[in-house]
Image (spheres, grey):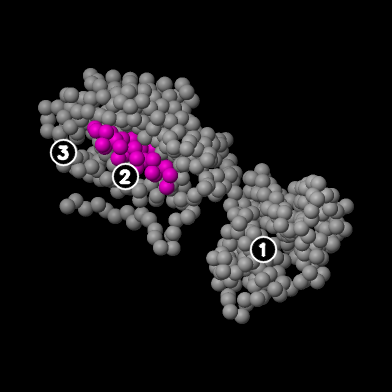
Amino acid sequence: MIKNIENIELHYLTLTDYKQLKEAMIQAYSSMPGSYWRENQIKSLIDKFPEGQVIIKVNGELAGCALSIKLDYDSFDDQHTYEDITGNYTFDTHDENGDVLYGIDVFIKKEYRGLRLGRRLYDYRKELAEKQNLRGIAFGGRIPNYYKYAATLSPKEYIESVKRKEIHDPVLNFQISNDFHPSKILKGYLEGDENSGEFAVLLEWDNIYYEKKSKKAATKKKVVRLGLIQWQMRLYKDLEELMQQAEYFVDAVSAYRSDFALFPEFFNAPLMADNNHLPESEAIRELAKYTPEIVQKFSELAITYNINIITGSMPEIKDELLYNAGYICKRDGSTERYEKLHVTPDEAKVWGMQGGNELKTFDTDCGKIGVLICYDSEFPELSRILAEEGMDILFVPFLTDTQNGYSRVRHCAQARAIENECYVAIAGSVGNLPKVNNMDIQYAQSMVFTPCDFSFPANGIKAEATTNTEMILIADVDLDLLKDLNQFGSVRNLKDRRTDIFEVRKLPKKNKKIK
């Protein structure tokens, strides 16, 4: 290792560096005589893609190099060779509009190894991929120590042994430690690479910030503002008066430029007061008659106030069965429905309510979201399925009568944020309804939860409302922080799951039978 280092600098490669570059390549590939790039080839690379060719200098001397091109990656077969990728070493395969950065070469001279210079070259490539909005980086990694084990191990077994630290392979270990994941074995990749048996490992790195180009004049937001409505239960003379109060809150959170307004579960329960003389199972069905009109009015408010509204939940009758359902009324005018899958024993016994059977995520202009109504948040399998579908934010409208019930929802919701690396927003109702049977009292504290890591609050709480007080709660959440967490978090709950021994999955949808 070189001592007395005065400076380390990263430079774009130029032809004036070629003499030093050639000497370095001859040294780096001493096991493959004559394996160095000719001057005309380097000139071609520089002309085609100057940003992709960088060198690192120590005390003014060339210490390492990284060469790359851009490719339309899907146009190449999974079992490609080095010759295929480079266009027979002409680099005519370089595509200025390509979507993947493909590594052609990277090396550090022997006397400069141990200074982590290779990491700097890989970091540059990652920054370049992010800057140019490429979906990732790929390259065929040599396994130059494989010849020592070729008689007893297949390439796949060799790689698995390296990953388990049973075999030390400085090249492959280094690449894996830099967040590149082996995706397949490439046979006959580099002609003349006898030490590797002409095998290579296709290594890939995914750019978590990649955004697929769209022809629409719109972009998805990275910092999303949530508006939670902690709703006071009070009597209203009719639907119009209830919706006036709802519009008041939509107006309030939209004035703070919120992207979402979240209402609680059964926020419209006060309208049951007129039917309090009926049995509870009949009164709730009368309340369900208001649902289509409420959804229509919320859709109009979403457009008028330019905000996505999550309507909490309402009773709804479908095919003569009673469900607990809600709607996402988007600011573009579209609506989507979600339903409570697990009804509580009280909902089933007193109201005759059925559990729904559809679980899905929803695409919005502020990322992918999921909604679980109250009791559903206490079943971790549901949110895990949504997380696997790419959910960024989980909304939980709830209604709890006691602090015990609230604590179940609150603590389960926070657990969902940690285990699924997402944000969770919960909103409930407060106050009392003395003239509505089975809806006497409410207890709530609306909150926004985050994962617990360095980029988030240490206690995992982004914002919290005052307990049992009517109010709104505004909180900003950064979706890019979730991507960083997934790749670089202190722990990575999604990535580290042992999917080789367990899985959580949705079953095919079946027609629900009435027992």
Residue at image point 54% right, 49% down: 487
Q: Which mark is residue 344?
A: none
Q: Is residue 247 left or right of residue 354?
A: right
Residue hosting label 3:
350
State which quarter of the image contains the N terminus.
Answer: bottom right
Magenta portion: prevailing SS class: helix
Q: Is residue 360 visible?
A: no
Residue lying farthest to the front in this orientation: 4
Q: Is residue 237 left or right of residue 93?
A: left
The stretch drawn in magenta includes residue 412: yes
The secondary structure type at the circle numbered 1 is helix
The secondary structure type at the circle numbered 3 is helix
Residue lying farthest to the bottom in this orientation: 151
Residue at image point 28% right, 19% down: 241
Separation (CA) of disc 1 from disc 2: 46 Å
Residue hosting label 2:
378
Separation (CA) of disc 1 from disc 3: 66 Å
Residue hosting label 1:
171
Q: Amino acid at mark 2?
A: Glu
Residue at image point 44% right, 51% down: 388
Q: Amino acid at mark 3?
A: Val
The stretch drawn in magenta includes residue 504: no
52 to 222, vertically: above or below: below
Q: Position of residue 489 (x, y in %)?
A: 52, 47
* 509 or 152: nearer the viewer: 152
Q: Is residue 419 left or right of residue 87?
A: left
Q: Amino acid at mark 1?
A: Val
Q: Is residue 64 visible?
A: yes
